[in-house]
Image (tube, helix red, strand yellow):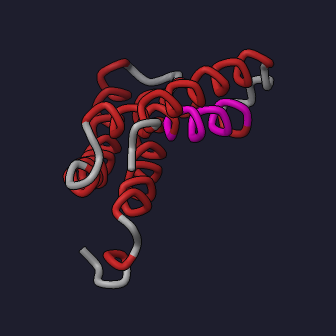
Amino acid sequence: MIAWFQTFPTWVQTAILLTASNVFMTFAWYGHLRSLQGKAWFVAAAVSWGIALFEYLLQVPANRIGATELSLAQLKIMQEVITLLVFVPFVVLYMKQPMKLDFLWAALCMLGAVYFIFRNQG
């Protein structure tokens, strides 16, 4: 890992890598619905698989770094919160779908999950 990156706290390193990983994951899973709509499914699958490689190149080190100080449950909740934070702008800005109040309710539920998973930390 790059030396300056290692100066950040473990949870920050993990969050940065998971966020970058999620950007690739979101495009791999859903980007083809817009950009490859007219192509055969196996073309979309191959392109998505290629994008997903970059997701894994970031996600695996993120989880290895995070697991040094966080529990698996904490890593999973962090991943899910980051997924929502990446997915909502993707849906609205890239997929051109309307913002829904349900996104707010989902975010509030995730905040509850964060509270319960991290409350005994420290």
- 90 in relation to 99, above or below: below
Q: Main secondary structure of the magenta part?
A: helix
- 16 in relation to 78, above or below: below
Q: Nearer the viewer, residue 48 or 22?
A: 22
- Name the residue at 39% across, 67% down: 9
Q: Nearer the viewer, residue 77 or 19?
A: 77
- Name the residue at 40% across, 35% down: 28
Residue 19 % position (x, y):
46, 50
- Name the residue at 60% across, 20% down: 109
Q: Which region is colored magenta?
A: 82-92
Residue 85 % position (x, y):
60, 39
Say whether residue 93 is visible: yes
Q: Quadrant of residue 89?
A: top right
- Name the residue at 47% across, 38% down: 27
Residue 97 % position (x, y):
74, 24
Q: Which quadrant would the N terminus be assigned to in this image? A: bottom left
- 78 in relation to 9, above or below: above
Residue that sits furthest to the bottom in the current view: 3
Q: Quadrant of residue 35?
A: top right
